[in-house]
């Protein structure tokens, strides 16, 4: 499955949900926020929110800033 | 005690977390400053570099109040999007709202700022709006629902100090919500002068991060903010164009 993640086209082996996608990317769901096709996916529903071919995903976190 | 939207904070100094030479230096500087409110930015996770644990890993949320910003946003829509992501990533409804209008000066886009403030306030955000030192904009931000208005002392990262004390005083005298000067402070005397205008607090980042000794400067800034606040409350003597002797003019020898 091909997804656009943080601006780059990536091939993801098998992730059916946002949570599985994060696991595949080796990310801790507690420290990142996911936007799927411009919609924020709240943490309580990441395990039940499906991802599909062609989805546009943004994964963000806090960095240093003023 | 600084109070914003009903929440009390232990320091009138708010600090950023950008541009430090290391995370260790940042943490020590923040501790030395005495600040409780600490700003952070929302950015993409670098998927190819897993050594980059986000800043939460270093700051922890028990000791500091993390204030997400919308730095780098050039439109109301973009800033709203970042604010929503920041709320989801963080632990509170506060946002330091920036809508930048010019790349060279990083001066705010006032129309975008007002539009974004109105939308976010309705969504329950506690908007702290970074703005220029213009009274009318400040009044409109307050009317649009901002819980704090944050006029600049001078452009972001410039270190030029307080360019217009009169405008800052005017904004403070006319607003009900807290006025926190954000950006432009370069050294401790700048911070002191800002606080002497009677404002509620200062937010700074570069002045600490780019000081030769960030930790030393953080301590100096903490003291300066306290000194400036105390001097404001004490009320300064009148300015005079002539000298007035401090020692008695009588009792002099013949």
Image: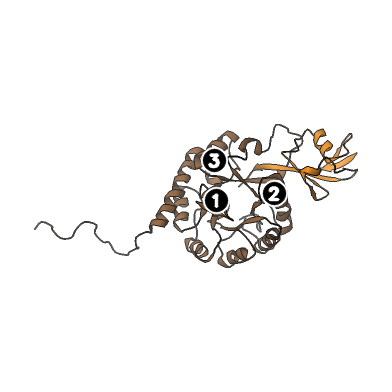
**SS at circle 1:** strand
Along the line of sight, which residue is nearer the eye, B102 or A17? Answer: A17
Residue at x-position 24% and y-position 57%: B246
What residue lies at 10% left-to-right and 56% top-to-bottom?
B253
Answer yes or no: is residue B22 visible: no
Q: Which residue is mark 1?
A: B8
Q: Earlier in the sequence, mark 1 or mark 3?
A: 1
Query: Residue B30: which disc?
Result: 3
Residue B68, horizontal then vertical, whole percent: 65, 48
Q: In the figure, residue A32 lies in which quadrant? A: top right
CB contact under 8 Å: marks 1 and 3? no
Assess whether mark 3 and mark 2 are in contact (beta carbons under 8 angstroms): no
Chain corresponding to orange in the figure: A
Relative vertical location of residue B198 with respect to residue B136 in this rendering, above or below: above
What is the drawing colour of chain B?
Answer: brown
Separation of marks 1 and 3 at Cα, in angstroms: 18 Å
Looking at the rendered structure, which numbered label has been put on residue B87? Answer: 2
Q: Is residue B108 above or below residue A28?
A: below
> Which of these two is toward me, B152 or B119?
B119
Label 2 Cα neighbours within 10 Å, binned few <14 / some 14-19 / many ≥20: some
Q: Position of residue B89 (x, y in %)?
A: 70, 44
Give the image location of residue B154, x and y in percent: 54, 56
């Amino acid at each position: 499955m091909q997804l656009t993640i943080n601006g780059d086209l990536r091939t993801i082996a098998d992730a059916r949900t946002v949570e599985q996608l994060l696991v595949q990317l080796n990310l801790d769901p507690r420290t990142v926020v996911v936007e799927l096709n411009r919609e924020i996916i709240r943490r309580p529903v990441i395990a039940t929110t499906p991802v599909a071919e062609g989805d546009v995903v943004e994964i963000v976190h806090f960095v240093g800033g003023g | 005690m600084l109070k914003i939207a009903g929440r009390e904070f232990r320091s009138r100094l708010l600090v950023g977390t950008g541009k430090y030479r290391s995370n260790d230096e940042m943490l020590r500087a923040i501790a030395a400053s005495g600040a409780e409110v600490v700003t952070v930015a929302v950015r993409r996770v670098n998927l190819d570099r897993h050594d980059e644990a986000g800043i939460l890993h270093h700051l922890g949320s028990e000791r500091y109040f993390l204030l997400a910003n919308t730095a780098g946003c050039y439109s109301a829509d973009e800033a709203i999007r970042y604010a929503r992501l920041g709320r989801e990533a963080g632990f509170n409804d506060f946002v330091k709202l920036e809508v930048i209008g010019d790349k060279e000066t990083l001066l705010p886009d006032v129309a975008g700022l007002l539009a974004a403030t109105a939308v976010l306030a309705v969504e329950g955000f506690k908007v702290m709006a970074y703005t220029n030192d213009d009274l009318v904009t400040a009044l409109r931000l307050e009317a649009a629902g901002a819980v704090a208005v944050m006029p600049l002392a001078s452009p972001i990262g410039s270190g030029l100090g307080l360019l217009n004390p009169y405008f800052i005083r005017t904004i403070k005298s006319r607003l009900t919500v807290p006025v926190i000067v954000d950006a432009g402070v370069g050294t401790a005397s700048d911070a002191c002068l800002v606080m002497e205008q009677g404002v509620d607090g200062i937010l700074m980042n570069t002045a600490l991060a780019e000081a030769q000794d960030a930790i030393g400067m953080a301590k100096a800034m903490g003291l300066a903010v306290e000194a400036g606040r105390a001097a404001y409350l004490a009320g300064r003597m009148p300015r005079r164009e002539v000298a007035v002797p401090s020692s008695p003019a009588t009792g002099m020898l013949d």
